[in-house]
């Protein structure tokens, strides 16, 4: 009797958990020939089945013509839900397989996992537990890969319910705790917490661990305090019934009756969950029967039987008839007792459920002593076969997991081998690339070192040239001082003598004076020529001294012109006072010009190069332009040459501006600050 009651409760819970009845749209006149209208009509309770099937087929035809996107997939599942609610299992299976094929083709893991869950529900209804378990297992693996904790928990619960139905209580308990572990990661209360605690309560009740059963049923009721869980699911009535059932198994029928009464007071119970309402009536009646309370008996039993029979709940009808048999046996009405029990036995045998047949055989053996031996023999045979089948199913579930994992391991092993090959190839490639980069970098380092040494040598030569220039300048200064002294002591002395002689002409007669004046004028002309010659020599020396840096640059341009084809055009602003520019600045400007010319020679393929030195207020501007192929300044990283140019400009406290583009040539502008005030003072002097 206990076994029968548990199965009835479980079947009711499974029915409620699998139900996907959607809310009917409030619109009484949906839009004609539209997908929402067809889906709404297909879910209308008041329409005949053939009309609902027709509307659902039309909805499916529209969906098949739509673009395959997330909305399209959601509509596919709506169609499947409506076939499920209709009980049109053939169409439900066909639609689910279609969803599965499309999602696997598109490699949509989330939709594939959901389709496997729907397929598992189909096999549950069709009583094909091994196929149902395999479908749930495939869904579980996909959800684990997606880290979808809610659906992982939902799939674990589906597996746990299946394992419980097949008598694999130990594995069912483990699976429920896996579901709870996934749910706790979400830190959000939902109906799956309730279903987990409720199933654990049923499991422990079956294993006669009543304290734990009550503990988890209490937790299930506590979860229902969350107002977000819809009241129409009638979870509270379900848990109150399950608590009452635990007390029935503990033979505390008074407590059990109180819980059944509380459950029956839940609002809209019959409208929302008629099977649960019928179960509560039967349990209340059985509790009253055990308490020997005759009021409302056997009417409660018969009322429950009537509801169950109208709903087509075969297992529940068997339970009601067995309870009526017990009642009439107690009332000494053996005829009715045997009649109800035989009806239950016949129905149980036709249902194919061994547990139902065992319950009926156990009862009829009690009330029909004459044939008790026959019934007992059949009971023992069926019970042994059922235990063997339960063990076989538990082993089959384990074998499904093992074989699926073995295939997965084989695939994983193959993937690992492929990964190993990829890793080996990648490592070899990286090693080869490393050596290539290493050798290339070594060559670049040698080239850079050579350039640095060349640069140091060039700077040493230039510094030596400047040093020689300084020596020449000092020598010329000494020479100028000597010339000045000669002018003062020689030319001025001669001029003074001529002037004195001219003054003395006033004291002699005119004829003699004219002759001497002519002689003195000739002397003055000679002195004038000497002064002009000295002046020209001094001017030439000053110009050579000032333009010594320009001469050095011109030699660089001359060498460039002799070696490379590009024509070099130069311009030196005469306003620049090179003698006032520091030697360090001259060195850096020389090296910048040299580096720029080298870059033009290597990369630009230019026809001509223009180098200009201009003077601006407080600044010296060096601009170098070539009409070569240019480069993208945003993408091209600074090379050694450009880096050196920027470094040298920075040394002069100047700035660098580069303008270039593919096919547009390159313009390099260096702006260096100089002290213009010194130039102005020099000009004034």
Image: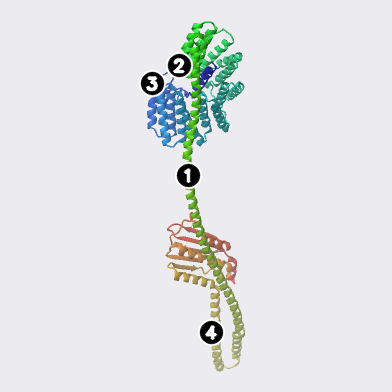
Viewport quadrant of the N terminus: top right
Residue 671 x/y as whole percent: 54, 62
- Closer to the camera in the image, 246 or 533: 246
- Closer to the camera in the image, 73 or 310: 310
Residue linked to disc 4 = 529
Residue linked to disc 2 = 349
Dot placed on the residue nearer the N-terminal end, 3 or 1: 3
Instruction: Give the CA distance from mark 4 to mark 2.
Output: 150 Å
Count numbered badges in the picture: 4
State whether residue 475 is above or below residue 301: below
For discs 4 and 2, the disc positioned in front in the rendered view = 2
For discs 1 and 4, the disc positioned in front in the rendered view = 1
Residue linked to disc 1 = 417
Residue linked to disc 3 = 51
Instruction: Give the CA distance from mark 1 to mark 4.
Output: 103 Å
Say what secondary structure mark 1 lies in. helix
Q: Which mark is residue 381?
A: none
Identity of the residue drawn at 48% across and 45% down = 419
Dot placed on the residue nearer the N-terminal end, 1 or 4: 1
């Amino acid at each position: 009797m206990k076994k029968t009651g548990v199965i009835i409760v479980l079947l009711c819970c499974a029915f409620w958990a699998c139900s996907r009845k959607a809310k009917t749209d409030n619109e009484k006149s949906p839009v004609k020939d539209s997908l929402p209208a067809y889906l709404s009509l297909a879910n209308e309770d008041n329409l005949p089945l053939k009309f609902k099937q027709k509307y659902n087929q039309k909805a499916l035809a529209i969906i098949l013509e739509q673009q395959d996107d997330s909305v399209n997939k959601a509509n596919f599942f709506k169609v499947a839900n409506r076939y499920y609610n209709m009980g049109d299992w053939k169409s439900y299976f066909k639609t689910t397989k279609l969803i599965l094929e499309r999602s696997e083709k598109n490699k949509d893991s989330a939709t594939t996992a959901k389709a496997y869950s729907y397929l598992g529900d189909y096999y549950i209804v069709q009583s094909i537990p091994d196929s149902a378990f395999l479908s749930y297992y495939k869904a579980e693996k996909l959800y684990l890969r997606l880290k979808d904790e809610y659906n992982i928990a939902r799939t674990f619960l589906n597996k746990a319910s299946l394992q419980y139905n097949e008598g694999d209580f130990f594995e069912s308990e483990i699976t429920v705790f896996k579901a709870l572990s996934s749910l706790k990661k979400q830190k959000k209360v939902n109906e799956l917490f309730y279903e987990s605690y409720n199933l654990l309560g049923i499991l422990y009740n079956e294993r006669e661990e009543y304290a734990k059963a009550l503990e988890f049923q209490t937790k299930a009721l506590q979860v229902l305090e969350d107002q977000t869980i819809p009241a129409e699911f009638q979870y509270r009535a379900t848990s109150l019934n399950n608590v009452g059932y635990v007390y029935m198994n503990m033979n505390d029928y008074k407590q059990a009756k109180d819980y059944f009464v509380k459950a029956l007071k839940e609002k809209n119970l019959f409208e929302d969950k008629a099977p649960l309402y019928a179960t509560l009536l039967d349990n209340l009646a059985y509790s009253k029967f055990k308490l020997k309370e005759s009021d409302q008996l056997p009417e409660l039993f018969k009322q429950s039987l009537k509801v169950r029979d109208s709903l087509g709940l075969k297992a529940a009808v068997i339970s009601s008839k067995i309870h009526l048999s017990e009642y009439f046996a107690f009332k000494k009405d053996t005829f009715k007792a045997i009649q109800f029990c035989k009806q239950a036995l016949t129905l149980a045998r036709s249902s194919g459920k061994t547990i139902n047949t065992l319950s009926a055989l156990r009862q009829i053996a009690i009330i029909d002593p004459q044939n008790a031996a026959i019934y007992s023999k059949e009971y023992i045979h069926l019970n042994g076969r059922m235990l063997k089948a339960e063990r076989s199913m538990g082993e089959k579930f384990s074998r499904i997991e093992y074989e699926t994992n073995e295939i997965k391991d084989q695939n994983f092993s193959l993937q690992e081998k492929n990964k190993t090959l990829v890793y080996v190839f990648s490592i070899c490639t990286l090693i080869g690339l490393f050596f290539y980069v290493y050798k290339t970098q070594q060559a670049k380092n040698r080239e850079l070192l050579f350039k640095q040494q060349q640069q140091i040598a060039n700077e040493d030569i230039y510094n030596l040239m400047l040093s020689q220039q300084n020596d020449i300048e000092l020598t010329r200064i000494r020479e100028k001082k000597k010339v000045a002294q000669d002018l003062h002591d020689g030319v001025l002395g001669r001029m003074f003598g001529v002037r004195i002689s001219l003054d003395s002409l006033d004291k002699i007669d005119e004829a003699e004076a004219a002759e001497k004046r002519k002689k003195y004028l000739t002397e003055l002309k000679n002195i004038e020529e000497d002064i002009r010659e000295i002046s020209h020599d001094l001017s030439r020396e000053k110009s050579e001294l000032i333009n010594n840096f320009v001469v050095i640059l011109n030699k660089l341009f001359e060498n460039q012109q002799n070696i490379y084809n590009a024509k070099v055009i130069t311009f030196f602003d005469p306003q620049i006072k090179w003698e006032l520019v520091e030697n360090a600045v001259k060195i850096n400007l020389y090296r910048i010009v040299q580096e720029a010319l080298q870059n033009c020679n290597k990369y630009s393929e230019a026809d001509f190069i223009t180098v200009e030195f201009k003077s601006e207020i407080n600044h010296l501007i060096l601009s170098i332009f070539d009409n070569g192929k240019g480069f993208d300044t945003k993408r091209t990283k600074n090379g050694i040459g450009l880096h050196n140019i920027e470094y040298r400009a920075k040394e002069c406290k100047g700035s660098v501006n580069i303008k270039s583009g593919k096919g547009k040539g390159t313009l390099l502008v260096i702006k260096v600050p100089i002290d213009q005030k010194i130039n102005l003072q020099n000009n004034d002097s």
